[in-house]
């Protein structure tokens, strides 16, 4: 990568600073060579930026040309670990962080004579996910044995529900705020073929060349497999779809951890077909005309989903353009790589010998249970977004999304606590001034408090700045008793552990706004105007109003701390410089 950058002459100084000494040496060699050609540094940087731009443009054009010619189709299978205490068919605990092989029942290890004991509690999170994904819940479903031999599956088969799953015909709606590709427009519905219950496998740890350790704590952890229809046509939308599915199953309490902790694993199925050629020979559940699919197994991040699809699409196009054929096969992906790799042949090669499990009776799900779950399901992420950007809260979509997603919903809870307290504190204010409170709280919670968290590298904790304190601080600001910079200063003080009530901090530190008189503003404005008469001239003669900001900044800086209000400062400056009022 670095070498190719150097070859293309696109290495930028900003990236060099973060690299190791050997790489810095390479960049030094590069600049020495160019100095010898006596190209001034500024010109050289300009050329580099230009070449980078044209390279990016070329790549975009190539992508677009390939998109015009080839249609990509993707369907995803998501395996999510359900939030349950016990395993699917035994009472062993699901905790995987305990000592390896400590949570294992005889049935999990397929001891002869052991029998499955279906854990009914598993159904609750599974059904919550199915309802949240708009599925039709099947009154009767059954378990099958899917046979394959691998050391992570002691019985030689996985118990799953492929043929008669407990939920069918759902869908997930994706909006552009979910990050779908621009060519998919504002909204896209992806159908979900089914949700099935199944067992997880054991966890392997490889110690090449000869050792592999197996931890059976994970074996038979209850999973749901969510299978989408092949209706996705861009890598970005596939990643957005997985992200959205994860956020839905998390927000309804069906799963505990997401992809980052291994609680969710994704297989992507990829095919391409030439748009102007005859329809493809392959079909899936009523959708026909598809190209031959390959399946990339076990992806564990959204980026891996997107990158693996791009790589596999390009590989398939190259094979087809050179007259080859795509084989139905299972492929793998390593993070950071640029190519998928063949793991094994699939279609036709493996016969799973599916058969009904004779030891497990059918699953019968009653309407009363469904009615109860339906009425207790938490609000969906989409409904939350609609609420937050609506008239009551007026958040921007860019703030609403992270507020919902951050810290497993804890950030949103905190936001609500602050808004609630603030509404009580502002009960005496008129409704127009209260209308913008949500937006302002969103800004403080995400950007100001969020900024302090990032800077200090601390994890979220609602007690760092109690919601009550933040509400009082915003209240003081809204009432113009303190300035914005003062509010930020006090927030940082509380963040660092000051537990005095906000009002006490403001009193004791003498931070309450004592507004400057008009004469004081005029004197301050005149003193900063004297610093740069040339700029004053430019503002006057060329009407360069943008430059007023510099003088406002100077007034804030040189004036007494916490006493200068920016809008007032600008008003006075306009008056003095232009003879006009705002
Ligand atoms: N031609 C195709 N191109 C792209 N995706 C496809 C194509 N045909 C099917 N798919 C997708 O492949 C996936 C098939 O999943 P399904 O679980 O039904 O079968 P499977 O992959 O054989 O099963 P498993 O991997 O669980 O053993 C679905 O997401 C479907 O949308
Ligand atoms: Mg599958
Ligand atoms: Mg599959």
Image: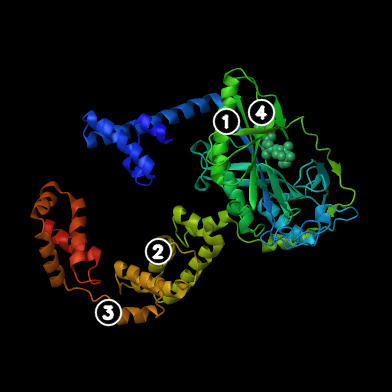
Q: Nearer the viewer, residue 581 or 160?
A: 160
The label shown at residue 510 is 3
Mark before the other along the chain sequence, 2 or 1: 1
Give the residue at mark 2: 452
Q: Position of residue 183 (x, y in %)?
A: 51, 35
Q: Measure the alpha-carbon separation of dots 3 and 1.
A: 64 Å
Badge 3, how many Cα within 10 Å: few under 14, some, many 20+? few
Mark before the other along the chain sequence, 4 or 1: 4
Q: Is label 1 in a helix, a strand or a loop?
A: helix
Callout in the foreground (3, 1): 1
Instruction: Looking at this view, name the residue that lies furthest to the front.
Output: 210
- Number of callouts in the render? 4
Callout in the foreground (4, 1): 1
For residue 264, above or below residue 292? below
Q: Quadrant of residue 556?
A: bottom left
Q: Quadrant of ligand 3?
A: top right
Q: Position of residue 343 (x, y in %)?
A: 67, 34
Instruction: Looking at this view, name the residue that lies furthest to the top.
Output: 323
Q: Measure the alpha-carbon separation of dots 4 and 1.
A: 14 Å
Give the residue at mark 4: 290
Q: Residue at x 10, y 59 (%)?
A: 531
Q: Is label 2 in a helix, a strand or a loop?
A: helix
Q: Are marks 3 and 4 in contact (CB under 8 Å)?
A: no
Q: Measure the alpha-carbon separation of dots 2 and 3.
A: 23 Å
Q: Is label 4 in a helix, a strand or a loop?
A: strand
């Amino acid at each position: 990568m670095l070498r190719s950058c150097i070859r293309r002459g696109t290495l930028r100084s900003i990236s060099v600073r973060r690299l190791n000494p050997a790489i810095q040496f390479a960049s030094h060699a590069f600049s020495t060579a160019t100095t010898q050609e006596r190209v001034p540094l500024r010109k050289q940087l300009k050329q580099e930026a230009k070449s980078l731009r044209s390279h990016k443009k070329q790549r975009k054009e190539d992508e677009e040309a390939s998109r015009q010619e080839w249609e990509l189709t993707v369907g995803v299978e998501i395996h999510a670990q359900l939030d349950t205490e016990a395993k699917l068919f035994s009472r062993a605990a699901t905790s995987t962080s305990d000592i390896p092989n400590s949570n294992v029942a005889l049935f999990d290890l397929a001891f002869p004579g052991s029998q499955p004991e279906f854990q009914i509690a598993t159904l609750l999170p599974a059904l919550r996910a199915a309802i949240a994904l708009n599925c039709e819940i099947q009154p009767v479903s059954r378990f099958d044995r899917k046979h394959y031999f691998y050391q992570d599956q002691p019985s030689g088969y996985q118990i799953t529900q492929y043929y008669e799953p407990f939920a069918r015909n759902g869908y997930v709606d994706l909006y552009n705020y979910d990050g779908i590709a621009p060519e998919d427009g504002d909204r896209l519905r992806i159908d979900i073929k089914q949700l099935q219950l199944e067992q997880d496998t054991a966890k392997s740890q490889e110690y090449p060349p000869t050792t592999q350790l197996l931890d059976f704590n994970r074996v038979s952890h209850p999973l749901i497999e969510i299978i989408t229809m092949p209706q996705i046509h861009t890598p970005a939308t596939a990643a957005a779809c997985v992200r959205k599915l994860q956020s839905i199953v998390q927000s309804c309490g069906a799963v505990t951890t997401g992809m980052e902790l291994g609680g969710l694993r994704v297989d992507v199925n990829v095919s391409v077909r030439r748009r102007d050629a005859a329809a493809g020979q392959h079909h899936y559940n009523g959708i026909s005309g598809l190209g031959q699919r390959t399946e990339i197994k076990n992806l564990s991040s959204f980026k891996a989903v997107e990158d693996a699809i791009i790589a596999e699409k390009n590989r398939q196009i190259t094979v087809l353009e050179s007259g080859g054929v795509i084989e139905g096969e299972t492929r793998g992906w390593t993070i950071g790589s640029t190519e998928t790799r063949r793991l094994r042949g699939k279609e036709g090669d493996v016969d799973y010998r599916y058969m009904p499990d004779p030891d497990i009776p059918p699953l019968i799900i009653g309407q009363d249970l469904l009615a109860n779950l339906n009425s207790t399901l938490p609000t969906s992420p989409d409904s939350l977004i609609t609420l937050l950007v609506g008239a009551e809260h007026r958040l921007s979509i860019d703030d609403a999304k992270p507020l919902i997603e951050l810290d497993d919903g804890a950030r949103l809870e905190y936001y609500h606590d602050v808004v609630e307290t603030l509404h009580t504190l502002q009960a005496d204010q008129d409704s127009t001034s209260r209308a913008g409170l949500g937006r302002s709280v969103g800004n403080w919670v995400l950007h100001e408090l969020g900024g302090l968290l990032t800077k200090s590298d601390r994890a979220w904790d609602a007690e760092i700045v109690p919601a009550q304190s933040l509400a009082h601080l915003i209240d003081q600001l809204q009432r113009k008793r303190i300035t914005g910079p003062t509010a930020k200063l006090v927030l940082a003080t509380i963040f660092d552990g000051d537990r005095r009530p906000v009002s006490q901090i403001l009193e004791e530190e003498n931070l309450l706004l004592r507004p400057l008189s008009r004469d004081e503003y005029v004197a301050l404005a005149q003193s900063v105007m004297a610093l740069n008469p040339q700029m004053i001239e430019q503002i006057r003669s060329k009407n360069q109003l943008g430059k007023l900001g510099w003088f406002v900044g100077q007034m804030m800086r040189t004036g007494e701390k916490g006493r200068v209000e920016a809008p007032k400062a600008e008003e006075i400056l306009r008056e003095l410089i232009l003879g006009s009022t705002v």
